Image: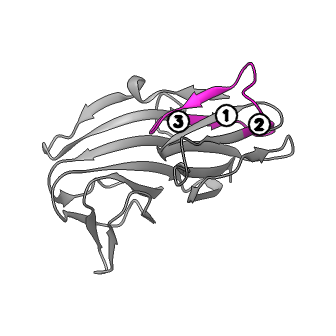
Amino acid sequence: MQIVRQSSFTSNPWKNGGGVTFEALRVPPEGPFRWRVSIAQIDSSGPFSYFAGYARKMVLLRGAGMRLTFGDDRQTVLRQPGDLVEFDGATATQCDLLDGPCTDLNLMVANSITGASARVDRLDTPRQLGASNPETVLVVPICGRLSIGPGQSGPEKLGDAELHAWDLAVVPPGTECTITPILAGIGDAPLVFFAALDDTIR
C-alpha cells in the first residue's frame, strides 16, 4: 500500500495563469502515463487542457462551484464538495467558475485500461477490501479523516495509517485492508472519493 501526503504533491502552474495543478501520482512516473491523480486549483474561468486518449473523473473539493460546458453544448454544474463528473479528455471543455476560485480532484485514466470506475461515498462504517480484489483501489478523503490498514476492523493496529483530507492511498490488487472512518462526533462521517482501476492493457 502506498500513502501519498498532500504536502508532497508536485505543483505546476498553468501556462495561461488560470490555476495550478498539484500532481499526487502518475503511473508510470516517466513518459506517457496510464493514470494520474492530481488536484487543481482553478483561479479563473477558461478552457480545460486537451487530453486525447484519456477519460477524466473530476470531483469538486472546495469552492462555490463551476459550470462545465462540453463541445456538444452539454452542461454540468458542480456545486457541492463531492460532486463528481466524468468526461472524455478529448472533448473541448469550458469551465466557468460560479463565484470565485475552486479546487478539484482529477483522475485521468488512459483509454487503453480495460476498466475504471469512481464514486464518492459518505463513509460511516468500516469498509474492507479482500485479498481476492483484482483492482487497484484509490482512496482520497474529501473531508474528514480515515484510518487505513491491514486486517479486520477494530481498534487501531500497528501498521495503520491515518489519512487526512486530500491525502491519497493506493491499495494494490490482492491487498487485504480495512478503511475506517475517524468520527469526531455525530454527522462527521468523512466524504471519500473511491476509484477502482483494472490496470490491464488491452
Residue 11 position, x and y percent, is 30, 30
* Inter-mark Cα distance, 3 to 1: 11 Å
Front residue of 201 and 93: 93
Front residue of 174 and 7: 7
For the stretch drawn in magenta, the main secondary structure is loop
- Amino acid carrying label 1: it is Ile
Specify whether 172 is left or right of 60: right
123 relative to 25, above or below = below
The numbered mark at residue 148 is 1
* Inter-mark Cα distance, 3 to 2: 15 Å
**Earlier residue among tags 2 and 1:** 1
- Amino acid carrying label 2: it is Cys
Specify whether 105 is left or right of 202: left
The answer to the question of whether label 3 and label 1 lie on touching residues, with beta carbons closer than 8 A, is: no
- Amino acid carrying label 3: it is Leu
The C terminus lies in which quarter of the figure? bottom right
The numbered mark at residue 168 is 3
Please state the extent of the stretch shown in magenta in the rendering.
154-178
User: Farthest residue toward the front?
Assistant: 186
* Residue identified by numbered label 2: 177
Residue 128 magenta-drawn? no
Residue neighbourhood size for the residue with mark 3, other residues' Cα within 10 Å, grouped as few (<14), some (14–19), many (≥20): many
The answer to the question of whether label 2 and label 1 lie on touching residues, with beta carbons closer than 8 A, is: yes
Is disc 2 placed on a helix, strand or loop? Answer: strand
Residue neighbourhood size for the residue with mark 2, other residues' Cα within 10 Å, grouped as few (<14), some (14–19), many (≥20): many
